[in-house]
Structures are given as C-alpha cells and as structure tokens.
Image (cartoon, rainbow, N blue to C red):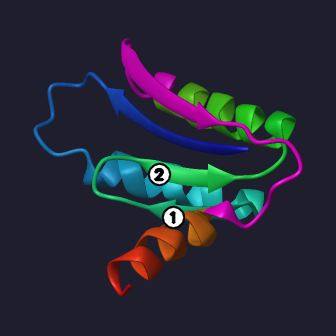
Amino acid sequence: MLAIFSIAPHTGDKHLSGFVAQTLELIRQSGLDHQLTAMGTLVEGEPEEVFNLIRDCHIMMRDQADRVGTKIWIDDQVGRTGRIRDKVASVEGKLSE
C-alpha cells in the first residue's frame, strides 16, 4: 500500500516544519519505506502498518494542538511493493523515449 499524508496542527504558527520534523522522526522509527515531499510524506507498507503509523502521527500532533487536520490519499495495489521508486521511474523512462 502507498499512502501520502499530511498533518497540520492548528496552533496559529505560520511555519509547520518543526511539527513535520517531529512526525518524520516517528516515520523513520517505523522502518517503513518513505519519502518526504513538499506537500506530505509518502509511505509504503502493509495496510495495517501504514494505518497504524498515520494514526500514531496524528495522535502525536493532537497532543500538541486542540485541532489537527490530517489528509490521506491511498493507492492500494495488492501484491505490489517498491512502488515509491517504480512509479517515478516509469514516468521518467517515458520522458526519455
């Protein structure tokens, strides 16, 4: 399963990079393949692992703010792994054709 998610605690802060860094540390500890992007974090793993990680990240942010918004987009293709890199490589390969 691939999922890209972003979590925004509503604290009144203009900059969220400190919150993102805290979340990224939790993601790294999970051992799941991941990629930080400018608009969210892409993770790949078994559905239960991915959902648990996103839940843990959301709860961590909820401990810091009374209101937290979480957006999740999932692409679940059974039996496929390594798609974080494969999907990008597929597009880049078509560019060079």
What number of labels is visible? 2
The residue sitting at 38% across, 85% down in the picture is: 97
Kind of residue at disc 1: Gln
Q: Which residue is mark 1?
A: 35
Q: Position of residue 66 (x, y in %)?
A: 38, 12
Which amino acid lies under the numbered mark 2 shown in the image of this protein? Thr
Q: Quadrant of residue 7?
A: top left
Q: What is the magenta range?
A: 62-83
Q: Measuring 66% from the left and 28% from the top, which residue is drawn there?
A: 55
Secondary structure beneath dot 2 equals strand
Residue 82: which quarter of the image? bottom right
Please tell me whether mark 1 sits on a helix, a strand or a loop.
Answer: strand
Which residue is the extreme one toward the top? 66
Q: Which mark is residue 53?
A: none
Query: Relative to 96, is 16 above or below?
Result: above
Q: How many residues crowd mark 2 within 10 Å: few (<14), some (14–19), many (20+)?
A: some
N-terminal of the pair, mark 2 or mark 1, is 1
Q: Are marks 2 and 1 in contact (CB under 8 Å)?
A: yes
Mark drawn on residue 41: 2
Is 35 in front, or is 57?
A: 35
Relative placement, left or right, of 37 versus 38 is right
- Residue 9 percent across, percent down from the top left: 34, 27
Quadrant containing the N terminus in the rendered view: top right
Q: CA distance from mark 2 to mark 1?
A: 6 Å
Q: Residue 39 in the image: x percent, y percent?
A: 30, 47
Farthest bottom residue? 96
Classify 34 as above or below 7: below
